[in-house]
Image (cartoon, rainbow, N blue to C red):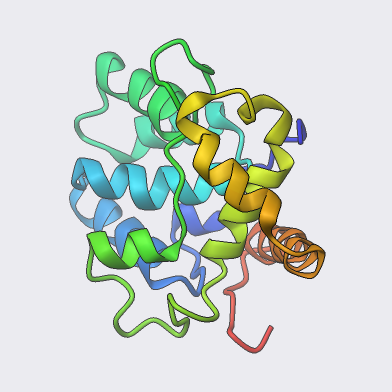
Amino acid sequence: GDARTPLPPAWWGAESGLRCLDSVVQSVWAEGWSHHITRLMVLGNIATLLDVDARELSDWFWVAYMDAWDWVVEPNVLAMATYAAGGVMTTKPYVAGSAYIDRMGDFCGGCDFDPASDCPITPLYWAFLARHEPALKANPRMKLVMAAMRKRSDTLRQRDAATFVHVREVLANGRPLRPDG
């Protein structure tokens, strides 16, 4: 779990196939700004689930946002969004599956993926928890989700891990994800 993924081309405007990510990135490049929740629940969450290098993501925020002040970018990206600072400033990683993104925004409507069935963000979430279990298992705020992760069948856990590998590879190559593979 220590290998860091380079920031995928999707953050620079290449289509990812995830409407939430593509919409937020397009908006950021058009306006130089996005709401705090989309910074965390879309940009930071997906990057964290992919084990994107936190320094690269932080540098991207410096380039992309007109309000990129040191007191905003560094704590928000390195501590809150990616949990790269461990428990120094935040008590748990800010990660979630597709149901949370669906509940908190209007990105899922019109996406090629259904948040309830085939969106890769949920398996990415479970794969993240499994990869980082040694670091997260003692965190009291993660107790319930870690217990739920451990109850997942071997088949689901293997699917989650395979989804992580697939999504990371497709996005690293600047290609969009598709429901059919």
- Left or right, 64 with respect to 97, comes to left
Q: Give x and y (percent) for residue 36.
A: 22, 40
Q: Nearer the viewer, residue 59 or 80?
A: 80
Q: Nearer the viewer, residue 55 or 90?
A: 90
Q: Nearer the viewer, residue 160 or 35?
A: 160
Q: Give x and y (percent) for residue 178.
A: 59, 82
**Number of numbered tags placed on the structure image:** 0
- Left or right, 38 with respect to 118, comes to left
Eyeballing the image, is 54 above or below 111?
above
* Image quarter in which the N terminus is found: top right
Q: Is residue 8 visible?
A: no
- Left or right, 103 with respect to 117, comes to left
Answer with the quarter of the image where residue 176 lies.
bottom right
Eyeballing the image, is 17 above or below 54?
below
Answer with the quarter of the image where residue 65 lies.
top left
- Left or right, 107 with respect to 18, comes to left
Q: Nearer the viewer, residue 90 or 141?
A: 141
Q: Give x and y (percent) for residue 164.
A: 70, 58
* Image quarter in which the C terminus is found: bottom right
Q: Is residue 35 visible?
A: yes
Residue at left 54%, top 18%?
A: 86
Residue at left 72%, top 68%?
A: 156
Q: Residue furthest top?
A: 88
Q: Give x and y (percent) for residue 125.
A: 56, 53
Residue at left 29%, top 70%?
A: 107
Residue at left 62%, top 71%?
A: 175
